[in-house]
Amino acid sequence: MVTLYKSLQGKPIRVLERIADSLNQLNEKVDVLIELQKHSRGGIAGESLTDVLDVMTLLSLPDHLRKTAITLCNLGQATAEEIAEQTTRARAVESGYLNQLVLMGYLKKERRGRKAYFYVEKEDTGEK
Amino acid sequence: MMGKIIAFHSYKGGTGKTLLSINLAATYARKGKNVCLLDLDFRAPSLQARFKAEGSGYWLNDYLNGVCEIKKVLIDLSHLFSGNGNGKFLVGLANPSTEAIREMTAKDRKWEMRALGRLLSLRNSLLNDMHLDYLIFDTSPGLQYSSINAIVAADVALVVTSLDTSDIKGTQRMTSELYDLFEKKTGIVVNKVLADILSSTAGKENFSEHFHNTHNLPVLDTIPCFCDVLRAGGTCIFAEEKPEHAFAKTVERIAQKIEKL
């Protein structure tokens, strides 16, 4: 314990940041687990989890999810934070919505380092 | 200034979307703005015939299919404008062949999703990279995939309607059930209005207000039925060839009002 304390001396802020990051990651994972549980109760677990996010689907989404989905369509790929900047909603809120859209099969999620990127389809991101 | 994407749409066909989109684009070009007009009416392409353009070898169909970049599709028709200080006038055409139309009607949801992505990326390629000031979409009437994609990708949607009851009702439903969901800046243009309704300024204002109340959307203008316009059969770009004509003046007013939406 003492050695750990020594090794952390002088960088308390970075440690706190790391803890906050880890908590955020945990939060997202818990969100996903909660959603998964909801879905399995509904009896659709095991079904294919990919669907197509076309305009007609966008139209059928509830308002709060549509806003997130359209913003992501516009950005191509984004983190919850980048979406939150555009929608002026809280990052945690957007993270929840994005994960819900992933579960519904409309979005894909990829972790790069500490950040989670969301996108509709790989092909349309990056190079254009 | 950031460039702007404007989509012309309507509930019914034949309301004057194409005529208005060509003339709006021409109005901007004459003001020195760089514009690009895209024919997104893949079921009934019309810009190719209107401009008697040769085609660039690539169509907008190819761009949406992911076959080529948008630059390969665009045709430069800036030479159609005679004055000095005109902006660029670029046009992207839809393939008018029956085979191409048939193919476009058979696309699946996944294709439409990618097409939306490609339309959305035009903001980057045309407005940001090529520094165009205006990108104008001419779309298919009604609730077509391609039209809704265009509306989602646009900053401003202009709905052109006639005074036909079915058109008014349909437009109303479409704007309240579709446009509102996408939170688009929307303006209504009432076209082909009989001259006697518009004969007095008071009558015109009454009329606009009535429309504004039923649609809950701003009416950008009411355009009377012009015999000259009909007589020209779509071959004349009034904004360029007859800029003093009342129709050209109306389009100019619409251009100003778009900025205030």
Image (cartoon, rainbow, N blue to C red):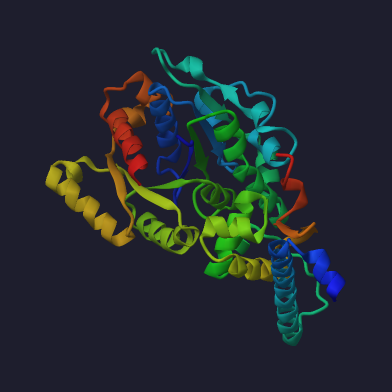
Q: Residue at x 33, y 34 (%)?
A: B251
Q: In this view, does B149 lie above or below B6?
A: below
Q: In this view, does B221 lie above or below B211?
A: above
Residue B132 on image: x %, y %:
52, 29
Q: Which residue is drawn at 72% across and 85% down?
A: A42
Check the picture and name the quadrant holding the C terminus of chain A: top right
Q: Which residue is drawn at 61% across and 69% down?
A: A92
Determine whether, in the image, residue A75 is placed left or right of residue A1: left
Q: Quadrant of residue B232?
A: top left
Q: Is residue A3 above or below residue A72?
A: below
Residue lying at the far bottom of the rendered structure: A41
**Residue A55 visible in the current orientation:** no
Determine whether, in the image, residue B160 is placed left or right of residue A75: left
Q: In which quarter of the image is residue B26?
A: top left
Q: Is residue A17 above or below residue B225?
A: below
Residue B18 on image: x %, y %:
46, 36
Q: Which of A88 and B10 is in front in this view?
A: A88
Residue B113 on image: x %, y %:
67, 53
Residue A33 on image: x %, y %:
75, 79
Determine whether, in the image, residue B60 is placed left or right of residue A48: left
Determine whether, in the image, residue B145 is placed left or right of residue A109: left
Q: Residue at x 27, y 25 (%)?
A: B245
**Residue B194 visible in the current orientation:** yes
Check the picture and name the quadrant holding the N terminus of chain A: bottom right
Q: Nearer the viewer, residue B126 or B192?
A: B126
Q: Nearer the viewer, residue B34 or B27?
A: B34
* Count of labels in the image: 0
